[in-house]
Structure formats: structure tokens, C-alpha cells
Amino acid sequence: MNYGRKGKWCIAKVPELDFVAQGKTIEEAKAHLEEVMRIQFAEMREMGTLEDYLAECGFIIQDDTIMPENEIVGFEKQVLQVA
């Protein structure tokens, strides 16, 4: 999950799954993102498309847990001053 700020909103996103949500605080944005993911996964499971979607994104379902097929390396945004 990545977090950032856009104007007065905090943004939470999972780029690997193409999910984004916003809130007034990072905690609120994270809670909204988790809700979006629960709703979307439930709808996809009901339509029978969840496993295909996850496979397209590089994930598999193993024992009711969503696992990446490959190791995921995370990045953190930082600002550096160049001399």
C-alpha cells in the first residue's frame, strides 16, 4: 500500500491491484481503501472473475490468502537535496 497527499486529501493506493481511495487522514484513506478492496473482491468473487483478475495482476489465491506470484519490492518516496 502506498500513501501520499494531494491537496488537502490523503491518498492510499495499491498500484499492483489498481485500487485507489482518499480520506482526510492517512488512517481514513487506508480504511476507505480496505473497504473498496473488500467490496470489489466480493463482487468479483460473485461474478466468478476474482481469480482471473488476480492472475492478471500477478497474484494467486492460496488457502483463502492472496499471495504474489513473484517477490514484490516496495519503494518509498523521498526528497533529496542535490549539492
Image: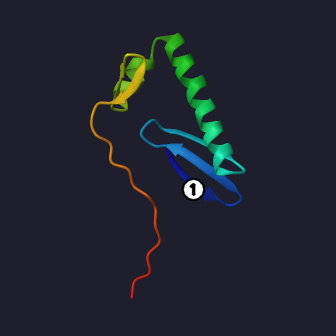
Left or right: where does residue 38 sit relative to residue 68?
A: right
Could you tell me which residue is drawn at 38 percent across and 50 percent down? 74
Could you tell me which residue is drawn at 45 percent across and 35 percent down? 17
Is 78 or 6 nearer to us in this picture?
A: 78
Give amino acid for label 1. Gly
Is 25 or 6 nearer to us in this picture?
A: 25
Q: Which residue is mark 1?
A: 4
In x, y percent, where is residue 56?
Answer: 35, 28
Looking at the image, is 31 positioned above or below residue 8? above
In x, y percent, where is residue 16?
Answer: 41, 39
Looking at the image, is 25 positioned above or below residue 83? above
Is 61 or 9 nearer to us in this picture?
A: 61
Looking at the image, is 77 positioned above or below residue 20? below
Residue that sits furthest to the bottom in the current view: 83
Left or right: where does residue 76 sit relative to residue 60?
A: right
Which class describes the residues within 10 Å of circle 1: few (<14), some (14-19), or many (20+)?
Answer: some
Task: Give the structural element (helix, strand or loop) at label 1.
Answer: strand
Q: How many marks?
A: 1
Could you tell me which residue is drawn at 68 percent across and 44 percent down? 28
In x, y percent, where is residue 7?
Answer: 68, 61
Could you tell me which residue is drawn at 53 percent across and 11 percent down? 46
Looking at the image, is 32 positioned above or below residue 56? below
Left or right: where does residue 64 sit relative to residue 71?
A: right
Is 70 or 48 nearer to us in this picture?
A: 70
Q: Quadrant of the C terminus?
A: bottom left
